Image (cartoon, grey):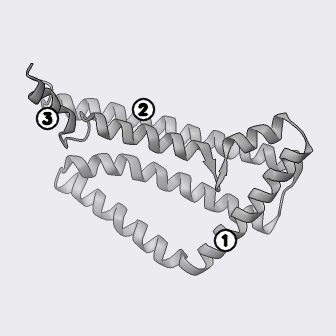
């Protein structure tokens, strides 16, 4: 195999056989499972394992991010929902009607991420209505992180399964 052919294969834009797409998928889900309502997982982990100072830091970060998310939702929620609905609808049409591979890959990434964003928004509104503190807050955040990881694992499984099916059926490997 010629090195120019190998380089061209590395930067091609076919979604499901591209290294760049799978790197983007891995990084996206890594970031999504590491941050809950703007709070990094290491802060949550330290609050669970260590002492009261770390727990106070977690409570402060959660309070700041909850107020920020709720205030942004009050201002931009209709526009945000309309934009997301339009983008997902456009990706669905381009994926299923026109068979555009890049749109299929983006839809496989964006649809489950929308679920994760909705879970985070719901959590922020719940914590705004009924603030939690201490170990109850830590348990709630760990539960949401677990659901985020479950959604991510299912999304990765189905994306990989569909990507293999697409690559084999379109004979991109042969």
Query: On the picture, is 150 further left or further right than 89?
Result: right
Residue highlighted by disc 3: 8
Query: On the picture, is 75 further left or further right than 50?
Result: left
Query: On the picture, is 117 further left or further right than 87?
Result: right
Which disc is residue 157 wearing? 2
Q: Residue furthest top?
A: 1
Question: Contact (CB < 8 A) between labels 3 and 1?
Answer: no
User: Mark 2 vs mark 3: which is more N-terminal?
Assistant: 3
Q: Residue 133 location, x and y as percent?
A: 87, 54
Labels 2, 3: front one: 3
Question: Contact (CB < 8 A) between labels 2 and 1?
Answer: no
Labels 2, 1: front one: 1
Q: Residue 63 location, x and y as percent?
A: 77, 62
Which disc is residue 70 wearing? 1
Labels 3, 1: front one: 3
Cα gap from disc 2 to disc 1, whole angstroms: 32 Å
């Amino acid at each position: 195999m010629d090195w120019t052919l190998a380089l061209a294969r590395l930067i091609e834009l076919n979604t499901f056989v591209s290294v760049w797409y799978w790197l983007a998928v891995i990084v996206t889900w890594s970031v999504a499972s590491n941050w809950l309502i703007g709070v990094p997982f290491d802060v949550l982990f330290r609050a669970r394992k260590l002492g009261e100072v770390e727990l106070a830091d977690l409570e402060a970060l959660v309070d700041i991010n909850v107020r920020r998310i709720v205030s942004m939702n009050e201002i931009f929620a209709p526009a945000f929902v309309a934009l997301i609905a339009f983008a997902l609808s456009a990706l669905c049409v381009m994926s299923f009607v026109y068979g555009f591979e890049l749109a299929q890959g983006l839809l496989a990434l964006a649809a489950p991420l929308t679920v994760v964003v909705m879970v985070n928004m719901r959590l922020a509104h719940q914590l705004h209505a009924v603030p939690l503190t201490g170990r109850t807050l830590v348990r709630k955040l760990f539960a949401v992180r677990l659901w985020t990881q479950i959604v991510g694992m299912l999304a990765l499984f189905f994306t990989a399964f569909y990507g293999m099916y697409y690559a084999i059926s379109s004979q991109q490997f042969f």
